[in-house]
Structures are given as structure tokens and as C-alpha cells.
């Protein structure tokens, strides 16, 4: 309900995917599952757009979104991501889309169990926060050059 269209990038297939394809076995990719869940949740298929281009990082995804916005003439995007990823994702998207006239907003998924009040009590959230700070530090260093 935040936007009229939902765009999601393709992610690299898991190891062994090619073997399954050669055997004509269907293994849904993450973008296939996301589209299926969105449509089952009432989002019309015409509102869902899956990119054909595979991305390997948040920066790659931001560059893909920039290209889509230029081509389609969009002037705003809402980046929906995990609560632990919002800060870095927002910084990357804003940097990549800077000067394009596209406004970037970031929203944390409301379906996450992450809670700012006690995230350090759950191992997976501790790992996610530590990893995000490492990646954030890398982004800061990367952009100095």
C-alpha cells in the first residue's frame, strides 16, 4: 500500500542451480517466491516487476533501480529492507541516485522480528548488526577514494 508498483532485483542462484535446470527440475529463485507471496497477498501481477538483471550487492541493486527510474521516469522510490540494513541501504541508494532527481525513502520491513530494544539477546540479530556495521565501515572507506 505504499506505492503503485513493486520492483525487485534478481539475486544470484544458489550453487547447484544449473544442475537442476539441466534436469528440468523447477527450483524457485528468491524473486519467484517474492512475486508468488506478493500476488497471494493481493498485489496485482501488473504491479510486480522482477528485474532480469542479477545483482550481487546493494550497490548493484541501487544502480539497477537508478536505470529503471531513468527509463520509466520515476521521481521517487521506497527501499524496503530489513531493519538492520536500512541505514546502509539508504546511504547507498541516496549516493547512487544523487543528481537524478529521484527521491529515496527507506522503510524497514514490518514483518521482521528485530526489535531495537533487545536485539542483542538474539544471536541472529547480533550477527546481522555486526555484519551491517562491517559493511557500513567498508562503504565509508570505499567512498573516500
Image (cartoon, rainbow, N blue to C red):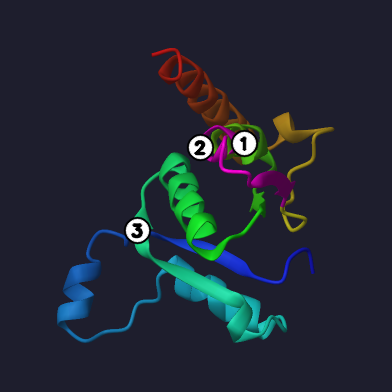
CA gap between label 1 and label 3 equals: 30 Å
- Label 2: which secondary element: helix
Give the class, few, some or many, for how many residues have Cα within 10 Å of label 2's Cα (few <14, many ≥20): some
Q: Point out which mark residue 94 bears.
A: none
Give the class, few, some or many, for how many residues have Cα within 10 Å of label 1's Cα (few <14, many ≥20): few
The residue that appears at 25% across and 59% down in the rendered structure is 15
Residues shaded magenta: 94-108
- Label 1: which secondary element: helix
CA gap between label 3 and label 2 equals: 18 Å
The residue that appears at 15% across and 80% down in the rendered structure is 22
- For the residue pair 66 and 1, the one nearer the viewer reads as 66
> Which residue corresponds to mark 1?
123
> Which residue corresponds to mark 3?
54
- For the residue pair 3 and 20, the one nearer the viewer reads as 3
Q: Point out which mark residue 96 bears.
A: 2
Numbered label tally: 3
The residue that appears at 35% across and 58% down in the rendered structure is 54
The residue that appears at 41% across and 19% down in the rendered structure is 142
- For the residue pair 2 and 29, the one nearer the viewer reads as 2
Amino acid at each position: 500500500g505504499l506505492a503503485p508498483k513493486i520492483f525487485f532485483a534478481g539475486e544470484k542462484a544458489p550453487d547447484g542451480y544449473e544442475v537442476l535446470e539441466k534436469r528440468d527440475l523447477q527450483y524457485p529463485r528468491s524473486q519467484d517466491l517474492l512475486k508468488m507471496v506478493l500476488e497471494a497477498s493481493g498485489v496485482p501481477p501488473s504491479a510486480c516487476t522482477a528485474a532480469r538483471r542479477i545483482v550481487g550487492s546493494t550497490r548493484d541493486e541501487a544502480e539497477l533501480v537508478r536505470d529503471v527510474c531513468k527509463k520509466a521516469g520515476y521521481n521517487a522510490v521506497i527501499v524496503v529492507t530489513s531493519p538492520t540494513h536500512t541505514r546502509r541501504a539508504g546511504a547507498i541508494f541516496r549516493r547512487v541516485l544523487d543528481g537524478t532527481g529521484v527521491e529515496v525513502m527507506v522503510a524497514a520491513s514490518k514483518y521482521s522480528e528485530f526489535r531495537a530494544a533487545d536485539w542483542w539477546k538474539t544471536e541472529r540479530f547480533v550477527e546481522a548488526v555486526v555484519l551491517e556495521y562491517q559493511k557500513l565501515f567498508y562503504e565509508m572507506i570505499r567512498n573516500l577514494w
